[in-house]
Amino acid sequence: MADGGWEGLTRRIISFFQSQEVKTPLSFMFRVVLAFVAALGLILYAPGLTASEKVTLVEFASGILILLCIFVGLFAWFRPRNLVYGESGHRAERRMEYGTERQVRTAAEVDALRPMRNRPPLEP
């Protein structure tokens, strides 16, 4: 704990729970796996549970994690692009369907546009 002590550790733990909203399914799965590992740690070190209760909870948690891995694997196999696509990616891809793009220009129309140079930045 030499690099920040308890305060630094506390900030890291709190930032894990509050930083950056989840925007893609893949980042959600990473968050779930990290939370699951933390839950397993809490189960194993819980003082009020018997050994058989801990084993049952670990088996249950492991089963859920395995099912989650199977689900993500199937999702990745059939729709790999959707794992990393967030809202902005879908909007950019489907802007014509959503009506945010006014018209489609052909390559000839783009080539016919008058070229322009960038203006120099203003002096302060």
Image: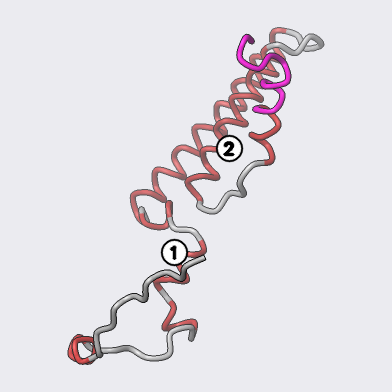
Magenta includes 11?
A: yes
Q: Is residue 8 above or below residue 19?
A: above
Give how far across and how far down residue 58 sits, in percent: 62, 20
Q: Residue at x 49, y 82 (%)?
A: 98
Pointer 2: what residue? 32
User: Along the line of sight, which residue is nearer the eye, 26 or 121?
Assistant: 121
Amino acid on which disc 1 is placed: Gly
Q: Residue at x 64, y 42 (%)?
A: 19
Give how far across and how far down residue 40 sits, in percent: 63, 21
Q: Is residue 6 above or below residue 118?
A: above
Q: Main secondary structure of the magenta part?
A: helix
Distance of label 2 from label 1 (alpha carbons) = 22 Å
- Quadrant in the picture for residue 5: top right
Mark 2 vs mark 1, foreground winner is 1
Q: Residue at x 35, y 55 (%)?
A: 78
Q: What's the magenta region?
A: 1-12
Pointer 1: what residue? 89
